[in-house]
Amino acid sequence: MNLLHQRILAVVKLIPPGYVASYGQVADLAGLPKRARLVSKALKSTRDSLIPWHRVVNSQGKISIPTQEPAHRLQLSLLRGEGIEMTGVKVNLAKHHWQPSLETLLFELQF
DNA sequence: TCAATGACGTATC
DNA sequence: CGATACGCCATTG
């Protein structure tokens, strides 16, 4: 659990119900460009239940967790449970892509 | 040390 | 739309 993870998780916590963000987008917002993979690691390793990890998908809007893993089903049901429109394993980004305003970020984040 | 490995992203074909 | 290739980089063995 280091500083980078904390910054990443701080951003993920801001994603509202009914919306999704991509790993790369979260990394950028956390001030860590080119670190999408670090985002997946941070989400994979945290136990904090207050973090909406399921609202993070890949840049194509698809669930990135391998189908075999139980977490894959969980993510799918959690997204559906928030009323997110999906085509199979892919989110309708046109309707549910999170696009925070600059004010929101400056107000919520501490860096 | 060092090579392999990802819940990634972009470019190309 | 699917498949491949590469760039990226912390973690793992």
Image: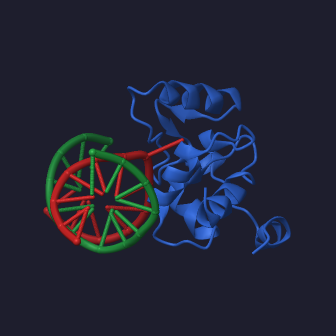
Chain colours: A blue, B red, C green
* Number of numbered discs: 0
Q: In this view, does A109 lie to the left or right of A57?
A: right
Residue at 70% across / 44% down in the picture?
Answer: A51
Residue furthest to the right in view is A107
Front residue (pair A29, A94): A29
**Quarter of the N terminus of chain A within the rendering:** bottom right
Residue at 68% across / 42% down in the picture?
Answer: A52
**Rendering coords of residue A82 (x, y %):** 71, 32
Residue at 45% across / 70% down in the picture?
Answer: A34
**Residue A14 placement: quadrant:** bottom right
Q: Taking B9 as reference, is A102 above or below it? A: below
Residue at 54% across / 54% down in the picture?
Answer: A22
Front residue (pair A61, B4): B4
Q: Is residue A26 left or right of residue A48?
A: left
**Quarter of the C terminus of chain A within the rendering:** bottom right
Q: Is residue A77 left or right of residue A52?
A: left
Q: Taking A95 as reference, is A81 above or below it? A: above
**Rendering coords of residue A84 (x, y %):** 65, 35
Front residue (pair A96, A81): A81
Q: Taking A64 as reference, is A79 above or below it? A: above
**Rendering coords of residue A60 (x, y %):** 45, 50
**Rendering coords of residue C1 (x, y %):** 32, 42
